[in-house]
Amino acid sequence: MTDLTLLTLAEAREGLASKSFSSLELTDAHLKAVEDARTLNAFVLETPERARSMARAADAKIGKGEGGPLAGIPLGIKDLFATEGVRTTACSNVLDAFVPPYESTVTSQLWRDDAVMLGKLNNDEFAMGSSNETSCFGPVVNPWRRAGSNGAIEGTPLVPGGSSGGSAAAVAANLCLGATATDTGGSIRQPASFAGIVGIKPTYGRCSRWGIVAFASSLDQAGPVAKTVRDAAILMRSMSGHDPKDTTSANLPVPDFEASVGKSVKGMKIGIPKEYRMDGMPDEIEKLWAQGADWLKAAGAELVDISLPHTKYALPAYYIVAPAEASSNLARYDGVRYGLRAPGRNIAEMYENTRAEGFGAEVRRRVMIGTYVLSAGYYDAYYLRAQKVRTLIKKDFEDCFAKGVHAILTPATPSAAFGIGEKGKADPVEMYLNDIFTVTVNMAGLPGIAVPAGKDAQGLPLGLQLIGRPFDEETLFSLGEVVEQAAGRFVAAKWW
Ligand code: GLN
């Protein structure tokens, strides 16, 4: 039999429907791939028993013609999603061996649709990071490697991006047919771009946040990473939908996103924001962007120059809003309710010891920044000001959309994947700059998709980002498909 892990989700769906193979066979092939790829450190927990029993149940349903839209499809789940009876840690020591007594809404919808869970995926601690290096389980290794000058595979291990680094690496290495991810400032799109796969951050409110470990509640949004635009559309339909348990969840019907894949983009107006052309932008990113614009034009779209004047304030404002919300959300990890407890002589000391021991350096930094900008004397100067900037950023986009722009094209990241340990050691801001093209989208609550579009001089994948109108992910799937068709798919050479 051919290697079932090389199939796309859509192809696997077809194979299952035509009984070319069973979900159990498909699941076993992926479990074996997961085992063989442990050097990548993409999974922090493998759940083979559960996977097989879910696969058997899916096979029974498929046999009776009763399988859901994801029947028998093996997926990986970011360890930020609470999974009932299965350890969920957000890759933080503070959660220790926490086993939730409940299931997140997004994952419960995947199981409702008969998908199969292979295990839990690595991520930056509490989703804070751009390289998956802040995880208490250690870094994830990107399946992609730099090509040496002689064309040989060079040894430097690369980061897969973050915070959804495990999700991106697992999909790129064919360990699962798709994965859940979350995006607060770029954590779906940046790793997707570093791993040569597709990732979409839906509009804020499209997917329920209930049961997802909170980072910054007004920015957090779940979404899929997948091998193709079509696969992402299939997954997103299952993940989306109104949830009364999340007050910010949008009460809107969920479109059949897959139907938008392959739809004509003729006559669509695509904005090219001049503020994204930053000083010192690498030539290859500039070229990739121009190439993407040409592809969309060739498909019948119209390119228009636009201005998003407050872009330059997005990153600084994000690094006030996100830590502020994080410091509040993370107050619950006190050694009483969840996971780790480090004893002390009294309760205050126990809190302190637990939080000092349980949180990693990046998380502690965010809690400190967050409490500072929210404190009585500084609230107006920092937090309130950042919120005002946020409103202006949102308005920039609204003005463009009001002028008839359907979507905006930008690079997804300022570079390709970098080496493990290469960035952010001396200066954390160096790491924060990874999200320069993605944070505005979270600040404005808009949908954004990252699609692989080319490679850098070292043979590493680079992505383009398309930003859409609120709740118009459909347009992004249509445009993303145009880029994917033109660029072709990117598959990492297996070395692990
Ligand atoms: N890299 C950004 C941060 O560290 C975004 C992370 C995310 O989207 N979860 O905050």
Image: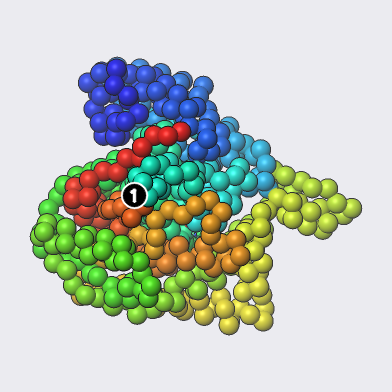
How would you rate the neighbour count of disc 1 (Cα within 10 Å): few for under 14, some for 14-19, many for 20 or more? some
Tell me where residue 297 appears, x and y as whole percent: 13, 62
Which residue occupies the foreground of this view, 197 or 102?
197
Which residue occupies the foreground of this view, 246 or 307?
307
Q: Residue at x 44, y 63 (%)?
A: 435
Q: Residue at x 50, y 56 (%)?
A: 130
Tell me where residue 133 appears, x and y as whole percent: 56, 51
Tell me where residue 203 appears, x and y as whole percent: 36, 58
Disc 1 C-beta below 8 A from ligand 1: no
Q: Residue furthest right?
A: 345
The number of callouts visible is 1
Q: Which residue is mark 1?
A: 459
Q: Quadrant of the N terminus?
A: top left
State whether residue 262 appears in this view: yes
Which residue occupies the foreground of this view, 234 or 361?
361
Q: Is residue 358 left or right of residue 383?
A: right
SS at badge 1 = loop
State whether residue 55 appears in this view: no
Q: Is residue 255 left or right of residue 215?
A: left
Residue 430 vertical position relative to residue 54 in the rendered view, above or below: below
Residue 372 sits in quarter = bottom right
Q: Residue at x 24, y 70 (%)?
A: 272
The colour style of the image is rainbow
Q: Residue at x 70, y 50 (%)?
A: 358
Tell me where residue 480 appears, x and y as whole percent: 24, 52
Residue 388 vertical position relative to residue 87 in the rendered view, above or below: below
Residue 233 sits in quarter = top left
Badge 1 amino acid = Gly
